Amino acid sequence: MHKIWRMKSKKPFSLRAFAQDCGGAAAVEFAVVLPIYLIALFTVIEGGRLVYSQTALYFAVQEATRFAIVREGKVSDSEIRDFTAGRLVGLRGDLAVVTVESPINSTVNTSEYTVNIRYSFTPIFPYIGHETLTLTASSRGFIAFPPVLPQSGTATS
């Protein structure tokens, strides 16, 4: 048998000697600190994903509202929904529900576009009781149509 495996002393076991022994202290400290470190690390990762997803939703609805306004209302709600889904960079479009409201106010000759989105965010590490979180974003824009003037040379009575 190798010398390394022999006992260092022939003394009987002592509780005092056990308490004063520092061998393996680093392993115990590592075992205590590692779970706390991993929880903090994964919380930061999930928080980053959550903030990115919310920012991507805001970007998508703002772009969709701009898309509708630039085309001066000559675009259907389904085209706006498809455009919004195409702007969800890094997110799954099938988890998003896009609604478009476009009422026309004929008294002031304006149209208002409101694009809303709800997204089911699924964390990689679900927290207790929260398997999915619902994120929302909304954007609103106005179109002011030019007034219709009578053409010159037409008779008015």
Image (tube, helix red, strand yellow):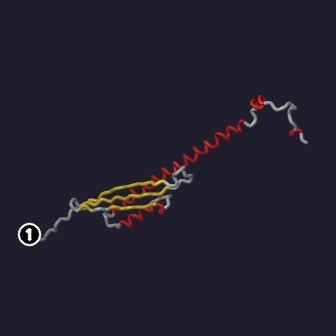
* The furthest residue to the left: 157
Provide residue 120's location: percent of width, then percent of height. Answer: 48, 57
Across and down, in percent, residue 67 comes to 37, 61
Q: Residue at x 29, y 62 (%)?
A: 103
Report the side of 46 relative to 107 (left or right).
right
Q: Dot 1 lies on which element? A: loop
How many numbered discs? 1
Q: Image quadrant of residue 36?
A: top right
Residue at the right extreme of this rendering: 1
Q: Where in the figure is residue 104, as x and y percent of width and height?
A: 27, 62
Q: Which residue extends farthest bottom?
A: 154
The quarter holding residue 77 reads bottom left
Q: How packed is label 1: few (under 14 Cα within 10 Å), some, or many (20 or more)? A: few
Tell me residue 64's x, y (percent): 39, 60
In the figure, is residue 10 to the left or right of 94?
A: right
The residue sitting at 15% across, 68% down in the picture is 152
Q: Residue at x 74, y 37 (%)?
A: 24
Amino acid of disc 1? Ser
Vertical relation: 95 (above or below) 12: below
Of the pair 69 and 137, the residue shown nearer to us: 137
**Which of these two is toward me, 68 or 117?**
117
Side (left or right) of 134 relative to 9: left
Residue at 48% across, 50% down = 51
- Residue in the foreground of this view, choosing between 146 and 38: 38
* Quarter containing the C terminus: bottom left
Q: Which residue is mark 1?
A: 157
The N terminus - image quarter: top right
Image height of 152 relative to 21, above or below: below
